[in-house]
Every structure is written in structure tokens, then in C-alpha cells.
Amino acid sequence: MNKETPNRLRYVYNLIFPHGCRKITIHGYLFKRVQEYKERVQVLQHLVPVYSEFDRPINTGAHAITAEVEVPAKEKKPVLEWGDKNATALDDILLLLSVFTLRDVFAAPEPIG
């Protein structure tokens, strides 16, 4: 069963895209790099130097908005039981992104702080 919601944008923290990838669509959610992506990724924690699309020096790090996600008009219910009646499939996706990228990937409707 789908939950009716208006199209909206959410800010995604700590998501690192594959080399050269500017956007990813997952289950109807469109994740796009922010304009300042290079600078924001360099602020994240890097315990070893990384040389990929651009250099990422060793850094103890901080959270940073690295992407924006466009939420579809009809969001599906999550597969996992979150204990929150407002949870959606986006919560499941962010959890999986956290697991597979080894980063705490989360989203907020407005920038934090």
C-alpha cells in the first residue's frame, strides 16, 4: 500500500557516490550530488588517503550534506519494522546505504545546524 505524499526534497548526509556518478535512482528516489560535492566529501572522515575521482586526505571528519534526494509523490511503506508510523522505504534505503558504504547515511528535511 502506498502512502500519498507531495514531491519534496530532503538533504542527505555522508553519501559518497561511485567515481564519476552524479545521480542514482533507487526505488523511485533520485539521489543527486550537491554542487559543492568535492568539498563536502573531503570534510568526511577518511582514515587513509583515498585517490579516486579527487583526493581525499586523512581527516577525522564531520557530517556533511553530500546529496539531495527527490522523494516520489507516492512513497512505499518500509520493509523493516521501524516502530514509526511515518517511516517509508527511504528509511530502508538509507540503512542499506549506511551498511554498504560504511558511513552513517541519513536524511533531513532541512539542513541540520
Image (cartoon, grey):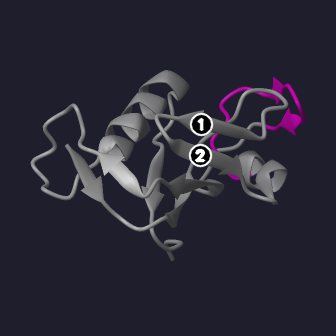
Badge 1 amino acid? Thr
Magenta highlight range:
43-57
Give the residue type that dot 2 points to. Leu
Find disc 2 in the rendering and name its residue: 30
Please give the name of the residue rendered at 69% of the width and 34% of the height, measured from the top-left corner: 17
The kind of secondary structure element at disc 1 is strand
User: Predominant secondary structure in magenta?
Assistant: loop
The residue that appears at 59% across and 46% down in the rendered structure is 30
Q: Please check the rendered image and state whether residue 105 is part of the magenta-colored stretch, yes or no.
A: no
| Image position of 38 (left or right of 69) | right
**Quadrant location of residue 1?**
top left
> Residue 69 at x, y = what percent?
56, 53
The answer to whether marks 2 and 1 mark residues whose Cβ atoms lie closer than 8 Å is: yes
Q: Position of residue 25 (x, y in %)?
A: 59, 36
Q: CA distance from mark 2 to mark 1?
A: 4 Å
- For residue 55, above or below residue 110: above
**Image quadrant where residue 52 sits:** top right
Total count of labels: 2
Which residue does the numbered mark 1 point to in the structure image? 25
User: What residue occupies the far left of the structure in this picture?
Assistant: 83
The residue lying at 49 percent from left, 72 percent from top is 112
x, y (%) of residue 10?
A: 51, 62
Q: Residues within 10 Å of mark 2 (few under 14, many from 20)?
A: some
